[in-house]
Amino acid sequence: MTPAQAIAALDRQLAVHGEAIKLRRGSKDAPSIVIALTGFVRGYKASDVVPGSGISQLDSKVIVSPTDLAAWLSPLPKNGDWCEIDGQFRQIVSHDHLKLDNVVVRIELQVKG
């Protein structure tokens, strides 16, 4: 599978099963940029919530595609940015990405709030 195929597959799944979210850079009340996109929002499994992991059952994992981040200020959202889900503001506390052949094909965010 090529990176383009992996991204296209994620984009198709997000279009069918994802939900509308917004990412905000800066303060949640006066952001420097807001971008609307589609993401998967999932709770963490009990097995993910272990001492020292920094994950609680109130946290969520948000998966987004690099396709939707073309207008973002930098390649990836960062800790301290905000994610608006169902009208509720949740702060990004951790982020990671998956690469295929040195191309980011999926972004995963841990959000609290």
Image (cartoon, rainbow, N blue to C red):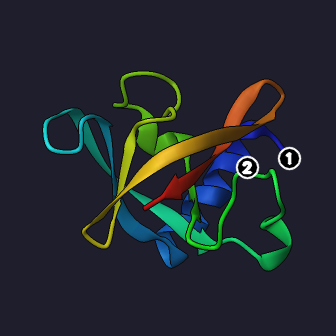
> Which element is circle 2 on?
helix
The amino acid type, in three-letter code, at marker 2 is Ala
Distance of mark 1 from mark 2, alpha carbons? Answer: 7 Å
Q: Is residue 77 above or below residue 11?
A: above
Q: Which residue is mark 2?
A: 6
The answer to which of 2 and 18 lies nearer the viewer is 18
The answer to which of 96 and 1 lies nearer the viewer is 96
Q: Is residue 59 above or below residue 108?
A: below
Q: Position of residue 27 (x, y in %)?
A: 24, 36
Q: Residues within 10 Å of mark 1 (few under 14, many from 20)?
A: few
Which residue appears at 70% of the width and 51% of the height?
54
Furthest toward the left, the residue is 30
Which residue appears at 73% of the width and 49% of the height?
6
Q: Is residue 93 above or below residue 104?
A: below
The answer to which of 51 and 36 lies nearer the viewer is 51
Q: Position of residue 21 (x, y in %)?
A: 36, 61
Left of 45 or right of it: where is 75? left
Q: Is residue 37 above or below residue 85?
A: above
Furthest toward the front, the residue is 51
Q: Which residue is mark 1?
A: 1
Which residue appears at 55% of the width and 44% of the height?
93
The C terminus lies in quadrant: bottom left
Label disc, if present, on residue 37 of the rendered structure = none
Left of 82 or right of it: where is 47? right
Left of 45 or right of it: where is 104? left
Q: Residues within 10 Å of mark 2 (few under 14, many from 20)?
A: some
Looking at the image, do the residues carrying marks 1 and 2 touch, with CB atoms under 8 Å apart? yes
Residue 100 quadrant: top right
Residue 29 quadrant: top left
> Which element is circle 1 on?
loop
The amino acid type, in three-letter code, at marker 1 is Met
Q: Position of residue 8 (x, y in %)?
A: 62, 52
